[in-house]
Image (spheres, grey):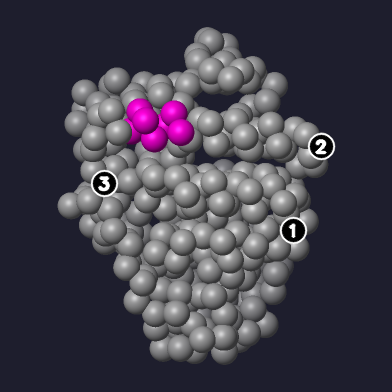
Amino acid sequence: MHFQYIIEAEDKKTRARAGRIITPHGEIETPIFMPVGTLGAIKTLDSSDIAGLGAQIMLSNTYHLFIRPGTALIKKAGGLHKFMHWDRPLLTDSGGYQVFSLKEKRKITEEGVGFQSHLDGTKVFFTPESVIQAEKDIGADIIMPFDECIEYPCEKDDAVKAMQRTHRWLDRCICAHRDTPTNQALFGIIQGGVFEDLRRESTTFISGSDVDGISIGGLSVGEPIEDMYRMTGIIKELIPKEKPLYLMGVGTPANLIESVSRGVDMFDCVMPTRNARNGLAFTSQGRVHYKDGKWKEMTDRPLDESCSCYVCRNYSIAYIRHLFHSGHMTALRLATYHNLYFYINLMKEMRQSILNNKFSLWKDAVLSKIGN
């Protein structure tokens, strides 16, 4: 079964919408949050944990999987689904974010990007064509084209060059994708920094390209949050209604809510898992630093008194704090499980509020409790 996006409901007061994405490995109900398993796993959890949490799709990273264990090995194993024992949809990023995050270890040319491995210094060269082949070997249901993610702040001339190169690379990715047809859906990535005219130009180009969905790249890289929301709103006005919109690398629970109200359908972010491992839990009442001393004797209080996840039903915040300060891996596992449950459940509630045409009321009520 090939990729398909179906709109089920649209909020009358905002641009929020609910829909379904159909892929070869199952359906995805939108708006959706994708847990990030960079190397084909989420730290401290396994695939059955993630499925049990109700996650409908996961994200992995082409650059990191190419470096280790190698996409040839993944292909030999039958693709990433089999390799990681995951029978639901997968999305792979292309490595374009590493063009930004590994700027000290890469060199950009028109042909592609030369990286020096962050592990052992080995030199590797990524081209749009080689990235598409790597993603085909990985076998994800939704794949991203190779792009150049620009840093913030940057000069406009640099943003123009990165955007135009991203467009040229997309054309090459599309050709490579056509040469060896699969059931994988290829999205396009909009770039342009925080420059409104560039974002409009890039959106027009990507919207006119032969892609199955549209992604917003180059945001959540340090720019003011107001700029991220402004760029998202501008882009939404210009893209085809029938294609899903994916805001890459975002974000806090409030970011998700505000972005859905601006028309975004898909998200991914390491925030819930990374913060969990550093002593922070997301809850219905806002952020809780569970490692703080004030929780030391709270043996009758869970991380979130309004949460029905396995962790909150069975463990106290005092116990999780105790494990964290004892250096016990179980603390990280329990906090990660809770945070992902919170994100996934938040998206389910948000979707239901759209279907019930009560999104604005739901949004105001939730934001008043969790803050920004």
Tell me which segment is drawn in magenta: 171-177
Label 1 – label 3 distance at C-alpha: 36 Å
Q: Residue at x 41, y 88 (%)?
A: 356
Nearer-the-camera pick, 361 or 232: 232
CB of mark 2 within 8 Å of CB of mark 3? no
Residue 63: give x, y in percent of width and height.
47, 28
Question: The residue under label 2 is which amino acid type?
Answer: Glu
Q: Residue at x 70, y 69 (%)?
A: 372
Label 2 – label 3 distance at C-alpha: 42 Å
Residue 53: give x, y in percent of width and height.
35, 62
Report which residue position mark 1 lands on: 227
Question: The residue under label 3 is which amino acid type?
Answer: Trp
- Residue 86's label in the rendered image is 3
Around disc 1, counting alpha carbons within 10 Å, would you say few (fewer than 14), some (14 to 19), or many (20 or more)?
Answer: some
User: Judging from the image, what secondary structure is the residue with disc 2 in?
Assistant: loop
Around disc 2, counting alpha carbons within 10 Å, would you say few (fewer than 14), some (14 to 19), or many (20 or more)?
Answer: few
Q: Is residue 183 visible?
A: yes
Nearer-the-camera pick, 80 or 143: 143
Label whose residue precedes the other's in the sequence (2 or 3):
3
Report which residue position mark 2 lands on: 155
Q: Residue at x 44, y 29 (%)?
A: 172
Please state which of the two labelled residues, at mark 1 or mark 3, is closer to the viewer: 1
Label 2 – label 1 distance at C-alpha: 16 Å
